[in-house]
Amino acid sequence: MLAELVAGAVADAAERRAAHPLAEVESAALSASAPRDALAALAPGDEVRIIAEVKRASPSRGPLAEIADPAALAVSYEHGGASVISVLTEGRRFGGSLDDLREVRRAVGVPVLRKDFIAEPYQVFEARAAGADLVLLIVAALEQPVLAELHALVQQLGMTALVETHSAEEVERALDVGAAIVGVNARDLSTFELDRDLFGTLADRIPAGVIRVAESAVLEPEDVTHYRRAGADAVLIGEALVRGDDPVATLESFLAAGS
């Protein structure tokens, strides 16, 4: 499944590149407004930080929410106390787009994460041109030299990488490229099975000074409490927010659970 998702994202990027060559997108990236400081936004504090996600669907859960106005949803997330807004830009299985990212960027003042299956420099330049402040890099999807190249490019463009891991080996690989934010995804991207305790088994491998993010398996406030007690500085939440009727109240309950 992961290989299929990466291949699809790369194929879609190739289509966009045919219409908008690398030189054009690179120029737009370099002339975009300076990125917001994601490290400051997610810095450890008395309360857990929340990365709130704009997410219409997923391969494991199918359709989640229509989200006709991603910008309005993002504004409600910001009002609810989210520190970062994550926007799914993968179109085939998640129903997202770079237009969603652009709309969200114009609407909110907090940092914005491009969440996609990034595998080549063109996609990183696209992210910056569209206004992203962070870019997701999935260790399991990338050979180490490519991971290092993409991480360096993200930094060169002034952005920050959220480097996602699923095992002790992947955590080491993330640290080897200098990741300042390491995520542990409870969902295995090969089987799509969930293990909420995975974060706790890996958190101690992430040294002080590196922001630790727990991803997936967050449906109730108690899940945030669980991750916070295991050492999470931030928690990424998608499904629970887009399925609910009141994202502001939901976020406030999650923040209270992680205080």
Image (tube, helix red, strand yellow):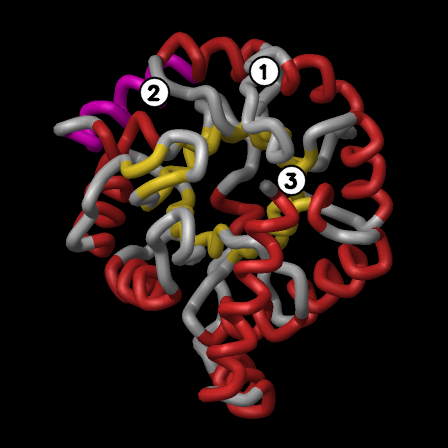
In x, y percent, where is residue 105? 33, 62
Q: Residue at x 46, y 25 (%)?
A: 48
Residue pointed to by mark 2: 254
Residue drawn 28% across the image and 43% down it? 78
Classify 10 Å Cα crowding around label 2: few (below 14), some (14-19), many (20 and above).
Answer: many
Amino acid type of the residue that numbered disc 1 sits on in the rendered structure:
Asp
* Residue at horizontal 34 percent and vertical 41 percent from the top: 57
x then y, percent, for residue 62: 34, 35
**In the rendered view, does 14 fall on the left or right side of 244?**
right
Horizontally, is 172 left or right of 165 in the view?
right
- Residue 232 showing in the rendered view: yes
Observer-side mark, 2 or 3, equals 3
Q: Is residue 212 visible?
A: no
The residue stretch that appears in magenta: 246-259
Q: Which mark is residue 195?
A: 1
Inspect the image, locate mark 3, and give the three-letter code of the amino acid beneath it.
Glu
Query: Considering the numbered disc 2 on the image, is that residue within a helix, a strand or a loop?
Result: helix
Main secondary structure type of the part rendered in magenta: helix
Residue 8 vs 26, above or below: the answer is above
Q: Earlier in the sequence, mark 2 or mark 1?
A: 1
Of badges 3 and 1, nearer the viewer stands 1
Query: Do residues under tags 2 and 1 come within 8 Å of each other at their CB atoms?
Result: no
Residue hosting label 3: 164
Q: Tell me the kind of residue under disc 2.
A: Phe
Task: Tell me how far mark 3 sits from mark 1, CA to CA.
Answer: 15 Å
How crowded is the residue under tag 3: few (<14 C-alpha within 10 Å), some, or many (20+)? many
The numbered mark, 3 or 1, whose residue comes first in the sequence reads 3
Q: Report if residue 254 lies within the magenta region.
A: yes
Q: CA distance from mark 2 to mark 1?
A: 20 Å
